[in-house]
């Protein structure tokens, strides 16, 4: 934003804040409608093409993936497993070959010597997931993994 008009300057910041809140699992009732209204105000009130088109990605995703937004806001889950705060990492012991690459590559040492992931302290950086030669680690909805309670 060049900062010249308020709808673009402030509106896009509020748009981003609301989207981030939803992606972090802190969405509230009415947030989806708030996004739609905010997008309309930004489009209508902006002076240039940037402000008039900036809301388009949010509007398109709401239009085509509304159920994902609703899952984030209402159930605090990310069906596509991309929002790090709404997913856990799960290590499938039956696939694991105990090579310890995941343990060595974990920046916060959240994988124990027993090959259990401490999701409460995990950064969800995916380094263990990417390095695992047997693809024994996967992303699952928060609280739904068989080792999500770390027991």
Image (cartoon, rainbow, N blue to C red):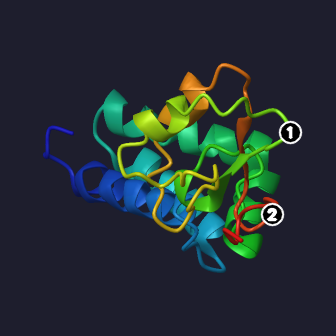
Horizontal arrangement in the rendering, residue 9 relative to residue 68 (left or right)? left
Task: State the residue at coordinates (48%, 56%).
Answer: 122
Chain-order first, disc 1 or disc 2: 1
| Quadrant that contains the N terminus | top left
In x, y percent, where is residue 57?
Answer: 55, 36
In terms of image quadrants, where is residue 118? bottom right
Q: Secondary structure at mark 1?
A: loop
In x, y percent, where is residue 69?
Answer: 70, 57
Discs 1/2, front: 1
**Closer to us: 124 or 22:** 124
Task: State the residue at coordinates (55%, 34%).
Answer: 100
User: To which residue does mark 1 refer?
Assistant: 94
Task: State the residue at coordinates (80%, 63%).
Answer: 144
Q: Secondary structure at mark 2?
A: loop
Residue 125 vertical position relative to residue 116 in the rendered view, above or below: above
In terms of image quadrants, where is residue 107? top left
User: To which residue does mark 2 refer?
Assistant: 144
Horizontal arrangement in the rendering, residue 94 relative to residue 99 (left or right)? right
Horizontal arrangement in the rendering, residue 54 relative to residue 13 (left or right)? right
Residue 35 vertical position relative to residue 60 in the rendered view, above or below: below
Task: State the residue at coordinates (50%, 52%).
Answer: 39
Image mark count: 2
**Label disc, if present, on residue 140 of the rendered structure:** none
| Quadrant that contains the C terminus | bottom right
Q: Residues within 10 Å of mark 2 (few under 14, many from 20)?
A: few
In x, y percent, where is residue 94?
Answer: 86, 39
- Determine the residue located farthest toward the bottom in the rendered image: 29
């Amino acid at each position: 934003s060049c900062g010249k008009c308020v709808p673009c300057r402030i509106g896009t910041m509020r748009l981003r804040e609301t989207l981030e809140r939803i992606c972090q699992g802190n969405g509230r009732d009415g947030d989806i409608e708030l996004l739609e209204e905010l997008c309309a105000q930004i489009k209508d009130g902006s002076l240039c093409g940037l402000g008039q088109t900036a809301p388009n990605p949010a509007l398109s995703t709401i239009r085509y993936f509304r159920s994902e937004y609703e899952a984030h806001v209402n159930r605090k889950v990310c069906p596509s497993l991309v929002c790090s705060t709404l997913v856990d990492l799960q290590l499938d012991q039956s696939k694991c070959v105990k090579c310890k690459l995941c343990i060595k590559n974990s920046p916060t040492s959240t994988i124990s010597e027993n090959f259990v992931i401490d999701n409460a302290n995990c950064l969800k950086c995916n380094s263990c997931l990417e390095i695992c030669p047997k693809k024994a680690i996967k992303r699952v909805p928060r609280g739904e993994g068989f080792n999500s309670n770390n027991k």
